[in-house]
Image (cartoon, coloured by chain):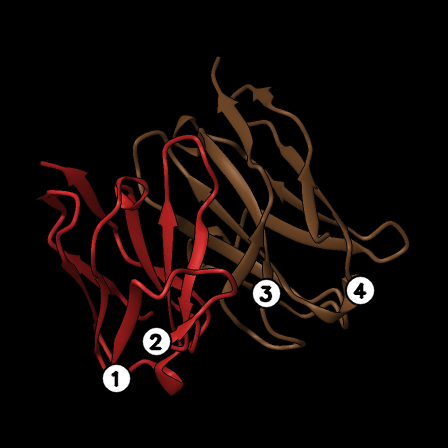
Chain colours: A brown, B red
Amino acid sequence: QIQLVQSGAEVEKPGAAVKVSCKASGYTFTNFGISWVRQAPGQGLEWMGWISPHNGNKNYAQKFQDRVTMTTDTSTSTAYMDLRNLRSDDTAVYYCARDSHLLRYSAAAYWGQGTLVTVSS
Amino acid sequence: EVVLTQSPGTLSLSPGGRVTLSCRASQTVTSNYIAWYQQKPGQAPRLLMYAASSRATGVSERFSGSGSGTDFTLTIVRLEPEDFAVYYCQQYGRTFTFGGGTKVEIK
């Protein structure tokens, strides 16, 4: 079955960076884009960006352009999200999610379990 | 950026009832690429609808979506206890954005 398994919870200090991984299984990794979505405590969903494992194309939300890098490793079917210069308001659960349709922007049919990132001094 | 506004923020309903959730876009959504998600506490979102009116795999027929252009709705009939959750709309026609969510709570 299709699974996205994310790395474990992280605690970071302000100004530091965090890298969250998302290992995919059960499908051909390069056929579907991966989005990263975060959710601050008690808040709604916020889209951060999208990457195509097929060709490396990326699309970042303007809010995160200067601080985020999304990559994929096709040899291990893993997507990564790197967020730099962390602030306290980056404290959130970070999700990876897989597109529902082949090789194009589409709704997210499969989600990772989420990774809690806490930013605190 | 396409801004999605969901209303109302919270709805209080009884099991067995019917609810219609609204999602309004600040500009026309390309190809009506609107998705709806359900999220329960402590869980990842679950895809319910895509392309405004197509039901995702395994989703009950009690859920239906409609709309075009800038106005979209999700309707749930015969509310069951497991339907009480937060619902988000998302557009994916021009990058991606989410609405602020509507909480459907038990009255």
Query: Which quadrant is the C terminus of chain B positioned in?
Result: top left
User: In this image, B32 relative to A2: left or right?
Assistant: left
The answer to whether tags 3 and 4 share a subunit is yes
Residue located beneath label 4 in the image? A28
Q: Is residue A56 above or below residue A38?
A: below
Q: CA distance from mark 2 to mark 3?
A: 16 Å
Residue located beneath label 2 in the image? B52
Q: CA distance from mark 2 to mark 1?
A: 8 Å
**Nearer-the-camera pick, A96 or A101:** A101
**What secondary structure is found at the residue carrying circle 4?**
loop
Pick out the residue farthest to the top.
A121
Chain under numbered label 1: B
Q: CA distance from mark 3 to mark 1?
A: 22 Å
Is disc 4 in contact with disc 2, using a CB cutoff of under 8 Å? no
- Nearer-N-terminus badge (2/1): 2
Pick out the residue farthest to the right.
A75
Please give the name of the residue rendered at 37% of the width and 44% of the height, measured from the top-left corner. Answer: B39
**What secondary structure is found at the residue carrying circle 1?**
strand
Chain under numbered label 2: B
Q: Looking at numbered disc 1 in the image, what kind of residue is underneath it? A: Ser
Residue located beneath label 3 in the image? A99
**What secondary structure is found at the residue carrying circle 3?**
strand
- Nearer-N-terminus badge (3/4): 4
Q: CA distance from mark 4 to mark 1?
A: 33 Å
Quadrant of the rendered image containing residue A102: bottom right
User: In this image, B33 relative to A114: left or right?
Assistant: left
Checking the image for residue B68, the label placed there is 1
